[in-house]
Image (spheres, rainbow, N blue to C red):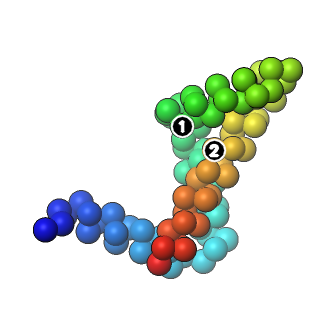
Amino acid sequence: MKSVAVYIAIGFIYLLGILPLPVAQKLGRGFGYFFYLTNNKAARVTRLNLIHCFPEKSEEEITSLTKDSLKSYGTSLLEMAMVWT
């Protein structure tokens, strides 16, 4: 028997899946920017990976790449919901 949380998550994925693509992409970029602002594990790992991959980049460039990467990550999460539904 599935818990209520599973049904809520499935419903949320379904609702995201029926959004028009441009809306889902903007919302996904917003999620990615939220990940950056909250400095969660995804943001920290992304930043560390970029520092290791591009040691010649300045701090501002690493910050910009981190933001762009997380925005792309958020967009792909919402696009996945569209594929699943």
> In screen coordinates, is 9 left or right of 63?
left
Which residue is under mark 2?
70
Q: Quick check: 18 above or below 45?
A: below
> Mark 1 falls on what kind of element?
helix
In terms of sequence position, does the residue under pointer 1 or pointer 2 come before the other? 1
Distance from Cα at disc 1 to Cα at disc 2: 8 Å
- Asked if labels 2 and 1 touch by Cβ distance under 8 angstroms, the answer is yes
Query: Residue 51 — which label?
Result: none
Residue 74: give x, y in percent of width and height: 58, 53
> Which of the 4 quarters of the picture holds residue 58?
top right
How many badges with numbers are in the image?
Answer: 2
> Residue at the location (48% across, 73% down)?
84
Q: Amino acid at mark 2?
A: Leu
Q: Residue furthest front?
A: 53
Which residue is under mark 1?
42
> Residue at the location (57% across, 29% down)?
44
Q: Amino acid at mark 1?
A: Ala
The local crowd at label 1, few if under 14, some if 14 to 19, many if 20 or more residues have their Cα within 10 Å, is some
Residue 79: give x, y in percent of width and height: 58, 66
